[in-house]
Amino acid sequence: MPATRDRALTERDFERLVEATYRLDGWRESLEARAVILIGGRLGLRPGELTHLSSEWIDWQREMIRIPAHDPCAKGRDGELCGYCRQVVQQQLADSTANVDELEAQYWRPKTEAGSRDVPFHFSARLGAALEFLDEEHGGWPYSFSTLQRRLLAALEVAPDLSVEATSPHGLRATAASYHAGRGLDMAALRAMFGWEDLETAEQYLNVDGAMTRRALSSTH
């Protein structure tokens, strides 16, 4: 499914949302909300990828997040699958000949084969700081998908001129795609960074808000 482009934030609204995290009560909740927004809205990780982010995925030397093809999930109660992975397994049961145990053994894994990829974060110092906080404080993202949603909602509730429905975890991914496409990242690079299998998804971002047309005119004139 393509990213939810109609819930992508403009750059101004994205900055409003980041700023709103400083208004949250509790330093830990504030930093966690900021990490969710920056990682989702500038790196474009899928919600399931962010939920399962661990220190082992972060290559500090290359400044890359290396999303694996498989990483056993033990984020649920008593080291079992988290609710996010269980929901995906239940959705797949109807279209699979595998049984529950076989499907559960496959999770966590990316949504598609192309989802296993390297995502650079060298271009933003504040992104690096957000990842460093999660790495040192928690060893990655330590909570469930529902907590990720709550951190984002808390920031939306105090963000000026934004409604609580302005964006979502999937909308943050669309925000990141629009941001990088608007700065000239070409189709091949967008596709690789976001883990899209088809070109059509990348193409829908390539002329977002006329940004590419504006750059072309500037280079011509």
Image (cartoon, rainbow, N blue to C red):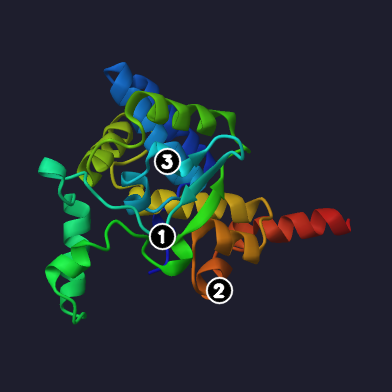
Which is more foreground, mark 2 or mark 1?
A: 1
Q: Secondary structure at mark 2?
A: helix
Say whether disc 2 or disc 1 marks the residue closer to the N-terminus. Answer: 1
Q: Is residue 103 left or right of residue 194?
A: left
Q: Residue at x 38, y 38 (%)?
A: 36
- Mark 2 packing: few (<14 Cα in 10 Å), some, or many (20+)? few
Residue 8: percent from left, percent from top: 44, 52
Q: Residue at x 40, y 67 (%)?
A: 112
Please state which amino acid type lies under the numbered disc 1.
Ala
Q: Residue at x 49, y 71 (%)?
A: 197
Residue 132: percent from left, percent from top: 46, 28
Q: Which of 56/118 is in front?
A: 56
Residue position for label 2: 199
- Mark 3 packing: few (<14 Cα in 10 Å), some, or many (20+)? few
Q: Residue furthest left?
A: 78
Q: Secondary structure at mark 1?
A: loop
Residue 31 falls in which quadrant of the image?
top left
Please state which amino acid type lies under the numbered disc 2.
Leu
- Mark 1 packing: few (<14 Cα in 10 Å), some, or many (20+)? some
Residue position for label 3: 56
Residue 199: percent from left, percent from top: 55, 74
Q: Which of 30/93 is in front?
A: 93
Which is more foreground, mark 3 or mark 2?
A: 3
Residue position for label 1: 69
Say whether disc 3 or disc 1 marks the residue closer to the N-terminus. Answer: 3
Residue 181 falls in which quadrant of the image?
bottom right
Confirm whether residue 20 shows in the render.
Answer: no
Contact? badges 2 and 1 (CB < 8 Å): no
